[in-house]
Image: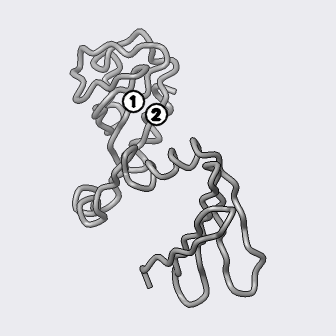
Amino acid sequence: MDEVFEAELPGVGKKYTLRLDENRTLDIVVHEDGRREVCYEESGREPVVIPLTDEQARKVGLILAGAYFRPAPAEALSSVLAGRVKIEWVRAGRAAGKTIGELDIRRRTGASVIAIVRGESTLPNPSADTRIEEGDVLIAAGTLEEIQRLKELVG
C-alpha cells in the first residue's frame, strides 16, 4: 500500500500517486513551472485539489519530513504523562514583573513551570528568582486542575 507510482504527463510534468488504502489516494502533480497540485480522493466523495506554489510545496515538504518538528513517540509521552498530567502553554499577563518565587506558583497552584518562552528564545528550568516579563509564555506541567489554577494566577 505504501508504494508510490510515478507517471509522465507530457507538456505538464509528473504525477505521483500514493494509495493510502483501498478507498483513498493522494496524487501530487509537479508542473514543469514548479507549481504543485495535491489531490486527495476518497471513493464516493468529490476530490479535494490544493494548488501550491513551488515555495509553498517546499515548506510543506519540510514540515512533512520533520524538519520543523519531530514528534516524540507515543510510548515515550505516555510514560512521562501517565495519568492526568498535562503540559500546557500559559500566557503570563498580570504576572509580568514578578518572579516565580514571589508568585509562589508551585505552592499556590501545584503546577510546575518547566520553561519560559520569551520572544524567540526559551528559558528551560527557570529558578524561583526568574522574573516573568510582559509577553512571556509559561510552559507548565500539572493536573488539569493545577493548570487551571495557574491560568487564574498569572493570566
**Disc 2 secondary structure class:** strand
* Label 2 close to label 1 by CB (< 8 Å): yes
Label 1 crowd bin: few (<14), some (14–19), many (20+), radius 10 Å = many
Q: Is residue 146 left or right of residue 19?
A: left
Looking at this view, name the residue that lies furthest to the front. 11
**Disc 1 secondary structure class:** strand
Query: For the residues marked 2 and 1, what is the alpha-carbon distance in whole angstroms?
Result: 5 Å
Label placed on residue 90? 2
In percent of the image, x 59 and y 78: which residue is there?
25
96 or 66: nearer the eye?
66
Label 2 crowd bin: few (<14), some (14–19), many (20+), radius 10 Å = many
- For residue 7, above or below residue 94: below
The residue beneath circle 1 is 138
In percent of the image, x 32 and y 26: which residue is there?
122
Label placed on residue 149? none
Residue 43 location in percent, x, y?
69, 86
In percent of the image, x 28 and y 34: which residue is there?
114
- For residue 12, above or below residue 127: below
> What's the residue type where badge 2 is placed?
Val
Residue 20 location in percent, x, y?
52, 80
Looking at this view, name the residue that lies furthest to the right. 46
| Colour scheme shown | one colour
> What's the residue type where badge 1 is placed?
Leu
**Res 96 quadrant in image:** top left
Residue 12 location in percent, x, y?
68, 62
Q: Is residue 76 left or right of residue 102?
A: left
- For residue 153, above or below residue 11: above
